[in-house]
Amino acid sequence: MPIDAAKAVAAEPRSAEIGWDHKDVLLYHLGLGAGSFQGSPGPATDPDELRYTLESKLHVLPSFATVAGAGKGVIGGLTGPGLDINLASVLHGGQTVEVHRPIPVEGRAVSTSRIAAVYDKGKAAILVLRSEAADDEGPLWTSDAQIFVRGEGGFGGDRGPSQRLELPARAPDRTVERTIREDQALLYRLSGDFNPLHADPEFAKLAGFDRPILHGLCSYGMTLKAVVDTMLGGDVTRIRSYTTRFAGVVFPGETLRIRMWRCAEGTARVQVSVTAVERDDAPVLADTIVDHS
């Protein structure tokens, strides 16, 4: 059954209470490689790393919004009126997080999700799954997951935005490399995404990969940490929004090359390119922008 775009967008939002504490934040940061000598610029006890790994000094990367409440929003949001989707045809195409104020180390919130848009790309459809979280003090974050559904296009809908960002025609302002530990996907999945594609070699082969791949949202979080640590003085509260397009896979054991450019003066924006070093700079994240104060 094809997607009924009008029915999906008109469906009533769904709300659920979510909660997290310092242990969830610590686990998420460790899953991104925080405190790892290979994955971080310094040793595990470096004060800059302890901001991510020690509860008495803890701050929260805004990308934590993608896993808060065990990160069940994406798959759970793909069921409902107008949607009859084979999850085997689903790819996570892109992600945007806008933070309205710093995420607390411990909290409870109401997360409300809905299909904000459905785009027709011909051979595929793109669903924009929007999740908004708010606590007693007001809005916390808005998260948009762009979900690519193969074989569900051709229904005559709006094609949606398709612009691609050109990289600046100059050398990056900063370039860093971050090694992905061999066990990193196994640790990251404990934050809520238990898809066997990231752990089971036999399942990965059925999906067309030689071995399990790293979660796209893990690369997403690793990249934001690198930008915060190298361009924003380690201050997570400066982040306003962070968006990317997942351009390719990366495997545990590989190295991310993260190139960063300051955008035009007055824009408070960093443009980022992420590639896999060992595969001749194969694209991993593209069209990546960090807006900050």
Image (spheres, rainbow, N blue to C red):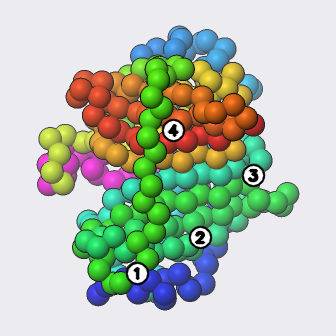
Which region of the structure is painted magenta? 190-206
**Closer to the eye: label 3 or 1:** 1
Q: Residue furthest front?
A: 169
Whether residue 223 appears in magenta in the rendering, the answer is no
x and y percent of residue 107 in the render? 74, 51
Q: Where does label 1 land, which residue? A: 157
Between discs 4 and 2, the one toward the N terminus: 2
Q: Which residue is mark 2?
A: 113
Residue 100 is tagged as: 3
Residue matched to label 4: 221
Give the residue displayed 60% in from the left and 39% down from the top. Answer: 290
Q: Amino acid at mark 1?
A: Gly
C-alpha span from label 4 to label 3: 18 Å
Q: Nearer the viewer, residue 190 or 60?
A: 60
Tag 4: residue type?
Gly
**Could you say which quadrant of the image residue 94 lies in?**
bottom left
Q: Residue at x 51, y 38 (%)?
A: 221
The part of the image, by quadrant, that contains residue 91 is: bottom left
In this view, the mark in front (3 or 2): 3
Kind of residue at disc 2? Ser
Is residue 126 shown left or right of residue 265?
A: left
Answer whether residue 203 is magenta in the image: yes
Pointers 2 and 1 in contact (C-beta within 8 Å): no
Dot 4 alpha-carbon crowd within 10 angstroms: few under 14, some 14 to 19, many 20 or more: many
- Disc 3 or 1, which lies upstream in sequence? 3
Between residues 243 and 54, which one lies in front from this camera angle? Answer: 243
Tell me, yes or no, if residue 5 can be seen here: yes
